[in-house]
Structures are given as structure tokens and as C-alpha cells.
Image (cartoon, rainbow, N blue to C red):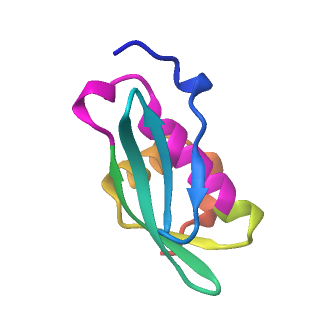
Amino acid sequence: MDFDPKDVAVIHNEEAHRFEATVGGLRALLTYQRFPDRIVYNHTEVPPALEGRGLAAKFAKTALDFARANHLRVVPQCSYVASYIQKHPEYQDLVIG
């Protein structure tokens, strides 16, 4: 499937506790648990047909920017989010630990 992640709208579905996007009828998402002072990023899921094009990175950036804007500390239980933070040290100050 051909798409540009820059053109994909990531929606914050607060009721479902996730960031999500639909591309070609396929849903990708990043789930979380929110607490008053922190947010735990649990899992990033991108369907195989959408993998390898930067969609997971867009989710991680969107979620981390959300945490910063809302003054939340981050617990990156999701291995992808943890890896993204290691590659983008500008988010390291958000991490609890």
C-alpha cells in the first residue's frame, strides 16, 4: 500500500485511551493509560501492510508531544516508544526513571 505518513491524520481517541489512524481501511494505534501526573504508553500496533513507512514514528512523536503539552511524565512500556525516545533525546526529559 502506498501512502505518505505526513498525509496521515493521527486522531487522539481519549475515550479509548489511544492515538489512532486509518489508512486504506487498516487501523494503526498507540495505546496508553493516563494518570494525573503521568502517561504510560503500552503498545504500538501497525498492520503489516503499513509497516516500514514511518507511521509508528509519527504515533510516537504525536504521543510524546501530547505528554509535553499536558505536563505529563512518560512511562514508555511500549518497546517502540522507548526506542524512539533513545533515538530522539529531546524527549528524554519526559521519562520517569
**Residue lying at 27% horizontally and 37% vertically, measured from the top left:** 47
Q: Residue at x 33, y 27 (%)?
A: 50
Can you give x and y, in whole percent of width and height, for residue 10 in the image? 58, 43
Query: Along the line of sight, which residue is nearer the eye, 93 or 11?
Result: 11
Total tally of numbered discs in the picture? 0
Which residues are the magenta region? 46-66
Q: Quadrant of the N terminus?
A: top left
> On the picture, is 97 further left or further right than 66?
left
**In the current view of this chain or complex, which residue is farthest to the bottom?**
36
Q: Residue at x 45, y 28 (%)?
A: 54
**Residue 24 shown in magenta:** no
Give the quarter of the image for residue 67.
Answer: bottom right
Query: Residue 63: within the magenta?
Result: yes
Q: Which residue sits furthest top?
A: 2
Q: Is residue 5 above or below residue 80?
A: above
Q: Position of residue 4 (x, y in %)?
A: 52, 18
What predominant SS class does the magenta segment belong to? helix
Query: Observer-nearest residue: 86 or 71?
Result: 71
Residue name at image x 46 percent, y 47 percent: 86
